[in-house]
Image (cartoon, grey):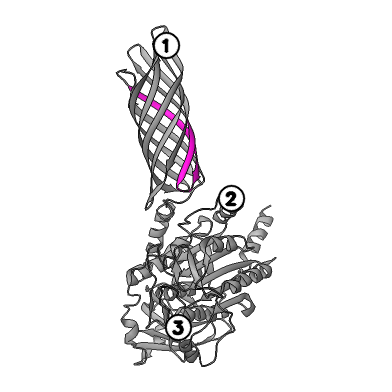
């Protein structure tokens, strides 16, 4: 038995890294009231060149139409690409799915370009605008046969593609697709929240988010130096640098909720190994053009690895530089003694961005992980279809009884976009001296949903029937057909994992039969509870 366990462990330890596949899209075009971008095509080409050093060329799809400036800078050395159209993207997705059958794979999707609420723009084949929605993208990648799929979007308002789905199609087919997407090992990291713009810089020759993302993917995000860039490390690295430097606040969803999910294993990749004695801000440029390909602020005492394609590079540290040649046979060691003074290395254009002036560490990753695990990151008011409620209520006892009434309620609600309908069962009881009062019944209710950031406010009203019985001494008075009408305001605060804390203030009007005449009684009620939604 022990031998079998050891053999299994050895096989797992020796399991090869997954094959890497990537669809990379860059589109400079704008549209009505949107400016043309300068560097979305450059970002796409930069990621394509980097992935070419990690995986075979037939594992990559490049959708970009390089502009004249990009073509001039490349001196004719541009890879084959397709136009960044909707048809080309759909074709690439079909080819990717066919290529993945039976493979141990990890898939990446990278987009650089303009984002609008709920969609990102593509090159029109007819008309003024072509786009791909967040729902389409999520559904396409959640259905592929891969260990993990990770989506990176460098676009304005890119959170809105996934976190705010807008008007919902409630057909069974679409709901089933969305439930499957939510449960899939799909990771998402976007450049900006639903209301923010995502910027680009001339000194970087690309977008802020793409620059930080490329550095983190290459290995700068490996905060614990274990040789693997994990999703939580990458999300923390991107958030740490983009928000500090450029004011952008990225948004993310971890694959299957797992921040430890691997994004890239570094050990078997070509590139650089940075000596533990190196520290401070390091920038890596590709020769001969000195294009910035990666940046990090390295703490002293820890080793670091950067995955880079074979080629010549300059590693800059302040005004010093070391030139290295990465071959197809592994990594090149970079030591402090390799650096010499170099005036060429000092480039004022990049200094204007202030660079990565603060070291990234495991403390940053731990802070993000703690917030995510406690529901801070994922607790967002969003569309839901079903809600189960458990509620405790307290109110002054009705009908003039001088006591406090306690109650419990169970409820179900069906979400219909901005509206919901539901049903509740209730039981309330109060006692004073030798008198006890009990109420049990069922109600149907309906309401509206208003989203206030992470909070949800719900005005609602209901109507139903209940039984009321009063026991005093050995005498019971009962009315089993009491009409009940309610109106109130519920506040819901999400706490993660589909759970919300609810607070409900409402008024109840019951019509009890007294001597054959139904008399209205008004009672306030405060209810606290927990709701589970999906």
Compare residues 52 and 435 and report the one nearer the observer.
Answer: 435
Which residue is the site of mark 2?
A: 171
Image side of residue 326 versus residue 489, left or right: right
Which residue is the site of mark 3?
A: 334
- Distance from disc 2 to disc 3, alpha carbons, whole Å, reads 58 Å
Residue 278: x percent and y percent? 39, 79
- Distance from disc 1 to disc 2, alpha carbons, whole Å, reads 49 Å
Q: Helix or strand or loop: what does disc 2 sit on?
A: loop
Compare residues 353 and 371 and report the one nearer the observer.
Answer: 353
The answer to the question of whether label 2 and label 3 lie on touching residues, with beta carbons closer than 8 A, is no
Image side of residue 401 versus residue 43, left or right: left
Residue 397: x percent and y percent? 33, 22
Q: Can residue 419 be found in the magenta stretch? A: yes
Write down the quadrant of residue 21 in the picture: bottom right
Residue 59: x percent and y percent? 62, 75
Question: Which sits earlier in the primary sequence, circle 2 or circle 3?
Answer: 2
Question: Which sits earlier in the primary sequence, circle 1 or circle 3?
Answer: 3
Camera-side mark, 1 or 2: 2
Magenta extent: 404-424
Q: Is residue 226 visible?
A: no
Camera-side mark, 1 or 3: 1
Q: Helix or strand or loop: what does disc 3 sit on?
A: strand
């Amino acid at each position: 038995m022990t031998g079998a366990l050891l053999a299994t462990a050895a096989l797992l330890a020796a399991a090869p890294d997954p094959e890497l596949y990537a669809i990379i899209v860059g589109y400079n075009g704008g549209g009505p009231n949107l400016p043309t971008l300068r560097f979305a095509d450059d970002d796409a080409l930069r990621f394509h060149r980097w992935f070419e050093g990690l995986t075979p060329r037939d594992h990559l799809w490049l959708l970009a139409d390089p502009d004249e400036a990009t073509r001039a800078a490349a001196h004719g050395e541009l890879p084959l690409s397709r136009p960044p159209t909707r048809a080309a993207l759909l074709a690439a997705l079909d080819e990717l799915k066919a290529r993945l059958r039976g493979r141990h794979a990890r898939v990446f999707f990278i987009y650089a370009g303009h984002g609008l609420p709920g969609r990102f723009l593509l090159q029109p084949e007819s008309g003024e605008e072509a786009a791909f929605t967040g729902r389409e993208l999520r559904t396409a990648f959640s259905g592929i046969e891969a260990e993990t799929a990770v989506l990176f979007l460098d676009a304005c308002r890119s959170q809105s593609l996934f976190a705010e789905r807008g008007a919902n199609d409630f057909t069974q087919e679409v709901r089933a697709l969305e439930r499957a997407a939510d449960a899939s090992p799909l990771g998402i990291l976007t450049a900006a929240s639903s209301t923010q713009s995502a910027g680009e810089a001339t000194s970087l020759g690309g977008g802020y988010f793409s620059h930080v993302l490329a550095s983190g993917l290459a290995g700068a995000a490996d905060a614990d130096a274990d040789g693997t860039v994990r999703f939580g490390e990458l999300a923390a690295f991107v958030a740490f640098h983009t928000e500090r430097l450029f004011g952008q606040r990225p948004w993310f969803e971890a694959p299957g909720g797992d921040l430890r999910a691997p994004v890239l294993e570094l050990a078997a990749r070509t590139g650089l190994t940075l000596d533990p004695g190196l520290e401070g801000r390091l920038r890596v440029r590709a020769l001969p053009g000195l294009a910035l390909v990666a940046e990090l602020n390295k703490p002293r005492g820890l080793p670091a690895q950067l995955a880079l394609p074979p080629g010549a590079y300059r590693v800059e540290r302040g005004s010093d530089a070391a030139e290295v040649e990465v071959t197809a046979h592994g990594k090149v060691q970079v030591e402090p003694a390799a650096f010499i003074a170099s005036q060429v290395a000092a480039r004022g254009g990049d200094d204007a961005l202030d660079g990565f002036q603060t070291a990234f560490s495991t403390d940053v990753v731990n802070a993000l992980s703690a917030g995510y695990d406690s529901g801070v990151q994922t607790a967002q008011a969003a569309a839901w279809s079903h809600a189960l409620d458990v509620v405790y209520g307290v109110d002054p006892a009705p009908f003039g009884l001088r006591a406090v009434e306690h109650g419990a309620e169970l409820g179900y609600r069906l979400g219909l976009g901005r509206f919901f309908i539901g049903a509740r069962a209730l039981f309330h009881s109060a006692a004073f001296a030798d008198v006890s009062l009990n109420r049990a019944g069922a109600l149907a209710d309906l309401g509206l949903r208003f989203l206030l950031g992470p909070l949800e406010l719900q005005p609602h009203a209901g109507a139903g029937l209940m039984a009321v019985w009063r026991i005093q001494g050995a005498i019971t008075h009962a009315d089993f057909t009491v009409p009940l009408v309610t109106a109130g305001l519920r506040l819901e605060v999400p706490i993660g994992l589909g759970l919300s804390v609810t607070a409900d203030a409402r008024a109840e009007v019951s019509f009890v039969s007294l001597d054959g005449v139904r008399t209205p009684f008004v009672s306030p009620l405060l209810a606290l509870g927990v709701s589970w939604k999906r």
